[in-house]
Amino acid sequence: MTHGDPDTSATSTTSGTPGTSTTSATSPGPLDLSLLRTFLAVHRAGSFTAAGRLLGLSQPTVTTQIRSLEGQLGRELFERRSRGVVPTAVADQLAAQVAAPLDALAVVADRGAPGTDQSPEPVHIAGPAELLCTRVLPALAPLTADGVRLRVTPGLTDDLLHGLRGGRFDLVIATARPRGRTLTWEPLADEEFVLVASPAWAERVGAGRVAAEGPAALHGVPLVSYAEDLPIARRYWRHVFGTRLAAQAAITVPDLRGVLAAVVAGAGITVLPRYLCLAELASGTLVPLLTPEDPPINTSYLTHRPGSPDNPHVTLVRERLLRAAPGW
């Protein structure tokens, strides 16, 4: 009986040539499609446990199936790591060969028997709370009339991408481009950042002073942020002013809508995505302190696992977001 991380019990190698399995190769023969399906899930999820959740299998079953496939091939497919497994070159080559045929077969197999009328599962989508609430949900709301059900989760990109790999989500809106080959992404929208204040604070700072004096014009003005390390403001200072921001926040609130509300109420200055404060800028309850020729831009990415989704409503949601995002 082994102990430790379940994924590390997948395969063991001998002290001889790396990349060979301890399981002796069986005589050549057709590869089992169920084993290939499990292999592809592991390759995409990066974890035996996560692949098991996607397939509805236990982790020991996934381990057994991968061992069986390795035995048929006579080659090791995955290297164990602390947080899952990493595919070998043999696994990458095999995945390239089987991914498209297995995805096409899954589409046919998942159509169901004639006459069945089973509603698709809810679509699980995750991303930044502010973007979900102000842009994503209004764009997706009409789909409920077509029977689409949504389960929406706010959070930070790294945590949400980990959940996507593990099968918790169908789609994730990431604020940074995902790394690695286990996920597929496409640019969704660009957000421009703007330095803003209430009219009262803008008057105290003085019209045109920020453009003339740079950040020195803001010395002593309270700063509102969604985190202690001032991530958005620091980026703005570096990109626009070419200098490091050395300040402490007067108020932190982990939701940019709260930051917006505080600044509108006169708490100080902040840097916000323009999409979030369009109405306030139009009404004059917020005033831009600077209009740089090259404002900071951040791109969000619509991310999903490779292959065709089993749930057709995932495709509807994805296509709807890609159509709506250019207008954000």
Image (spheres, grey):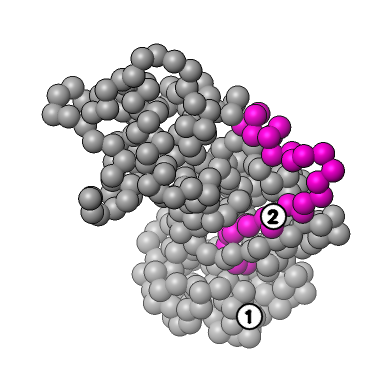
- Residue 233 seen from this side: yes
Q: How many marks?
A: 2
Q: In the image, what residue occupies the spot 18% across and 22% down? A: 17
The C terminus, quarter of image: bottom right
Work out whether residue 194 or residue 60 is closer to the camera in this orientation and state it: 60
Would residue 146 appear left or right of 202 to someone viewing this image? right
Q: Which residue is mark 2?
A: 121
Callout in the foreground (2, 1): 2
Q: Earlier along the polypeptide chain: callout 2 or callout 1? A: 2
**How far is disc 2 from disc 1 in space, using C-alphas?**
36 Å
Q: In the image, what residue occupies the spot 53% across and 28% down? A: 33
Quadrant of the rendered structure where residue 149 is? bottom right
Which element is circle 2 on? loop
| Label 2: how many Cα within 10 Å (few below 14, some 14–19, many 20+) | some
Q: In the image, what residue occupies the spot 64% across and 64% down? A: 152
Identified by mark 2, the residue type is Glu
Q: Magenta region: which residues?
A: 103-130
Direction left: furthest residue: 15
Direction top: furthest residue: 28
Relative to 112, is 36 above or below?
above
Q: Which residue is mark 1?
A: 261
- Residue 201 seen from this side: no
Q: Position of residue 322 (x, y in %)?
A: 72, 45
Name the disc covering residue 103, or none.
none
Work out whether residue 130 or residue 114 is closer to the camera in this orientation and state it: 114
Identified by mark 1, the residue type is Ala
Work out whether residue 29 or residue 195 is closer to the camera in this orientation and state it: 29
Q: Position of residue 118 (x, y in %)?
A: 77, 51
Q: Position of residue 251 (x, y in %)?
A: 48, 82
Work out whether residue 44 or residue 297 is closer to the camera in this orientation and state it: 44
Q: In the image, what residue occupies the spot 63% across and 80% down? A: 261
Q: Is residue 53 magenta?
A: no
